[in-house]
Amino acid sequence: LDIPPIANTDIALIWLHKGLYHHMETRSSSDSRPVELTITSCIDYQLNVVRLLSPIAREFMGSVDIQPGKIEISKVLTFGNQAHIQYKLNQFCQMKHFHAQVNHLPGVPTPQQSISNDRIQLSPLSSCVNYDVQLIAYYVPESYSVSRVMRIALPAAHDENKVHLSIEDENLLIEWKARAACQLKKSVINVLRNNEPWKQFDHTGAGPSDRIPLEKQYSTYAVSIKFIYANDFSEMSEIVSIVYGSQTTNSLNLTFDLHPNRMDLLWTGPGLYQPLFYRVDGVYDNGNEITKVVTGHRCTIPLEPGVEYANVIVAAVDANGERKISSHRTAWPKRGDSNSSLFTRSHLVYSHAIRELFHA
């Protein structure tokens, strides 16, 4: 064990076992030698570092647990009706006995154990049953170590424990498939809207589906289901998401009518997206800029005398600052062009406002 540098003073290294004194040594804090303790068994120790400020003053610096007999779980695999647990032990420790403690509901057969040097096999496992497994190693002379508790269950089939989402008639249709081999008591459905908790309800009726009416606004929904079966067996589904309004266009359909001294703009609304206002930006060929804010779907832009063309764009802006932008449209007054044709990039003169919207 390496001790970090400490201001010049004396320190005490105190070893405890089960809270009782085992060994102590003192040294200067400038002594950078590793701390060593000769052990003859795989019992657990705790090393405490205490700073000796004066004959009566002490400062506790910290502690560390030393577990030479610790059981490290490297992997848990389940397939067929078996579970394989891979583990690692300290080769220094002299083993007396090793086994797995398996807890489960009454009435369920206890699986048999097959133990090798680095793994233990449990079989057969029953479907729809949780097994709480803990590995225990007994060492010479009189010590033992336990692993963390692992909850093991046979996996669902590849088409089970699944959720499917769709939109039908402005309803969120939630369909699922639970484990066929287990007795389903209820399904607890959790729904997030735009990453915020929205609805949670229990489904206990017939049929693996449910419907939720949706508000007419652009939103993302995420659904997960907790399946609760008989015998206290439960599991969570995967999380599935869907966007309501994803089939509506992301851009506004902008058209205009051209008159001698003005152009009348008209655009369609952005589907389920609900803007707070619409912003019209543009630029004349002479460099003068156009900026208007409206709440409706139309706007009139004056055409200055002598103007060769005017280029405009419309953005729908919601309360969060999100935008949906139309294509650019260009009017050529002297040509009498009112076909709402797209203005090519080679002719486009960007104003600062247009660049800001286009790159937002």
Image (cartoon, rainbow, N blue to C red):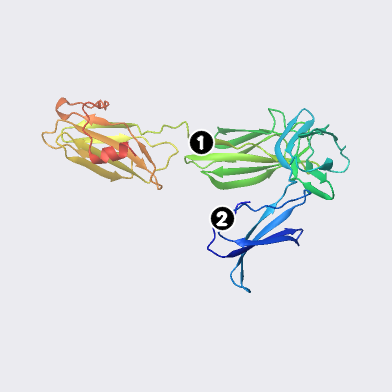
| Mark 1 or mark 2: whose residue is earlier in sequence | 2
The span from disc 1 to disc 2 (Cα, nearest Å) is: 54 Å
Residue 4, given in percent of the width and then of the height, sits at 56, 55
Q: Are marks 1 and 2 in contact (CB under 8 Å)?
A: no
Toward the viewer: 345 or 308?
Answer: 345
Toward the viewer: 147 or 317?
Answer: 147
User: Given the image, on which type of amino acid does mark 1 rest?
Assistant: Val
User: Given the image, on which type of amino acid does mark 2 rest?
Assistant: Pro
Q: Is residue 213 visible?
A: yes
Residue drawn at 21 percent across, 27 percent down = 347
| Residue at the disc numbered 2 | 4
Label 1's element? strand
Tag in front: 1 or 2 = 2
Which image quadrant for residue 236? top right
Residue drawn at 58 percent across, 70 percent down = 53
Relative to 21, is 250 above or below? above
Which image quadrant for residue 96? top right
Residue 258, given in percent of the width and then of the height, sits at 21, 31
Quarter in which the C terminus is drawn: top left
Which of the labelled discs sits on residue 243, or is there none? 1
Relative to 138, is 84 above or below? above
Residue 49, given in percent of the width and then of the height, sits at 64, 61
